[in-house]
Amino acid sequence: MNILEQAKWISADFGEVCPIYKKEFAAAKPVKKATLTITAFGFYIAEINGERVGDYIFAPGWTSYDFRLQYQEYDVTAMLSDKNELRVKHGKGWYDSPLMGKPDKFHKYDKAILCALEIEYADGTSEQIFSDDSFVAAESKIRFSEIYDGETFDARVESENWTAVKERYFPHGLLIPQQGDKIVEVERLKAISTFTTPAGEVVIDFGQNLTGYVNFLPTGKSGDVLELSHSEILDKDGNFYTENLRSAKAKITYICNGADDWYTPNFSFQGFRYIRLDKWSGDVNLDNFVAIVVHSDMKRTGHFECSNPKINKLFENIIWGQKGNFLDVPTDCPQRDERLGWTGDAQVFVRTASYNYDVERFFDKWLSDVAADQRPDGGIPSVIPSPWPLIGLDWYHSSAAWGDAAVICPWQIYLTYGNPAILEKQFDCAKNWVEYQRKAGSSEFLWDDGPHFADWLGIDSEPGEYRGATDQYLIATAFFAYSTELLVKSGKVLGKDMSEYETLYNGIVAAFREKYMPNGKLSSNTQTAHVLALYFNLTTDKAATAKSLADLVISSGTQLMTGFVGTPYLLHALSDNGYTELAYSLLLREDFPSWLYSVNQGATTIWEHWDGMNENGEMWSADMNSFNHYAYGAVADWMYGVCCGINIDESRPAFKHIIFKPQFDTRLDYAKASIDTRNGKVAASWKRDGGKVEYSISVPNGCTASVHLNGKVEEIGAGEFAFEV
Ligand code: BGC
């Protein structure tokens, strides 16, 4: 039995002030082992004898709280002495924040904590301490804390008036052990400069747009109020810019006690590069400010480098986009009043994410939430964990390319890491999603109904419109086909009879061709429509569709016109079909719209909009303009897969058999990539030597590879190899 079953949920209500709970206990005999098991609705920080327990930030993490709540176990043996004090600080966290800008309460229960401490003594006896009415509570120094708005901390407050806690009768049935990676402080960045803006604001620059918080040494007399705000970017005049945060206040207020030590916000994080010192006492000493980067504890696995420094900067920005948005849940952005697990963004980026970092556990947990939040009709909320009711909001669930995350993400996690368990676990969810699509249109084979986000933020949208020009139902039916195809593949890996879905797939493809490709031509003459027809194998004449895509790209001025749906596959659709040079031209393009445009504008992360900031420094809009949105960073999988040629063979996943299929371009002198896979390190590099290219690869022990070069395919085993092209 889970030890927490015997503990009572407890809470204390001090309005906006964060409670601190206390329990004193003795451990007068030698301790063999002591374990603290704890969770909360809200965030908790546990301390024993004044020391923080563990390094988990924002515990217990973010899950679909109505169904699943993680608990954590900490070995606290070394922290105990004869007389002990357990303290737990308690904040709102994701549980009680106005997610999606929605101030009213959504979750069923109030904030509360639940914990159990088990002490095993060396003499074989043991003792258990459970949260219950023997705990007391008081107001803490944290006068206010909220993920979006920031924190107010009064260092003068001593928690003195201990009062009784309230026992709560909340369920234990939704408790699950820690499933994802823990969230940790990963890096510390020094402040690089301070300056005064034209508006007279004192600003500190950390040189990098990041997700986390500022650790600072308050300097002031008792009662002095220090205040700082966060921002990702300066406006065209060089002033501090916060409009794109929308309602998120992103403000830290600290009240000094005159003997202050370094301070770190407890229950709040921000997406920022700059801070503005709205109120400060004394000199501004850069050594007194450090930005702490927080994200899920994932191991870096992928690297890429080439002879073009701007592409290298782009790649680095993609990595930072992942760091900034893999905070327990794959989020759209870390700064404005949103920071949510948008499904579409996650599916767009999952392949790149899984090469850059080991995200198997991360996605395993999030996909369990996708399944938990799936609607009874198979529909998938567009944001997971869902902060909104699952029923009743039609615009908010089951958009094409968003809901498809239910199939695309497990499939990619299986391909990258090779464990079919993820397919087994997610199979019903994926199947129910395909069944949802099957019922959602005018016929079994067409998904031509319902609201969709379409080619979100496509450049070809009408002025003032977020949705690109491609027919949303063409996109929906194309993704219906793709999800069905991946469902069939997943089922086959699991040894299931998938003939019904093979028939469904053939029907969708035929219906797509009839309705959206009459006479072989796409009914939407857009880049994205062509990209989907090619990448999802929906066209009968790849050469003609590819030519027509290439013509569209060239006639637009060799520029992309795509949004969230078309962009991830655009370069693949070109280079898979004979237009590699054009794909490189798009990658290397520097003018708006392009990946390098933002690099030239000084970006340190990936922007939500191709033109988040225009050449004159004007913002696209104040309304929806994140400078840390990873979606367009999906181009990194093309760098690994096409530029360096490292590809997974679906029949032998996890790089057990590698398909090396590089495509070079004369505008680069060299490129190299490596991925630490479940089967060892896979690497590929090439360099230009006069008119020749030397291509070198490394195949880990136990793996094999096919090398596609010079119009031939060569089968090889493990080892290091070099080829001349
Ligand atoms: C988010 C996106 C998301 C989209 C859905 C936006 O507000 O930031 O990244 O996918 O809404 O349309």
Image: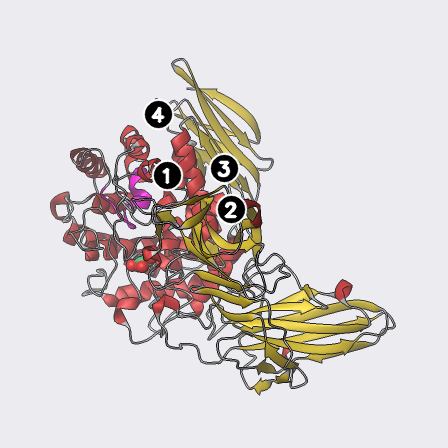
Is the distance from the Cβ of mark 1 to the nearest ligand 1 atom less than 8 Å? no
Q: Where residue 66 sits: x, y (%)?
A: 46, 75
Q: Does the stretch in magenta take in 106?
A: no
What segment carries the magenta color?
A: 561-571
Question: Which residue is rendered at x = 63% and y = 58% of the image?
Answer: 261
Which numbered disc, 4 or 1, marks the residue that appears first in the sequence?
A: 1
Marks 2 and 1, Cα distance to the nearest angstrom?
25 Å
Judged from this view, the residue extending furthest toward the right is: 123
Judged from the image, the secondary structure of the residue bearing numbered disc 2 is loop
Is residue 653 visible to us here? Answer: no
The residue mark sitting in front, 1 or 3, is 1
Tags 3 and 2 touching, CB below 8 Å: no
On the image, which quarter does residue 216 sit in? bottom right
Tags 4 and 1 touching, CB below 8 Å: no
Amino acid marked by disc 3 = His
Mark 3 lies on residue:
303
Which numbered disc, 3 or 4, marks the residue that appears first in the sequence?
A: 3
Which numbered disc, 2 or 1, marks the residue that appears first in the sequence?
A: 2
Marks 3 and 2, Cα distance to the nearest angstrom?
10 Å
* Residue nearest the viewer, comparing 364 with 155: 155
Mark 4 lies on residue:
665
660, above or below 222, in the image: above
Q: Quadrant of the C terminus?
A: top left
362, above or below 615, in the image: below
Amino acid marked by disc 2 = Tyr
Q: Total of numbered circles in the picture?
A: 4
Amino acid marked by disc 4 = Asp
* Residue nearest the viewer, comparing 535 with 305: 305
Q: Is residue 92 left or right of residue 394?
A: right
Q: Where residue 241 sits: x, y (%)?
A: 34, 52
Mark 2 lies on residue:
357
Marks 3 and 4, Cα distance to the nearest angstrom?
20 Å
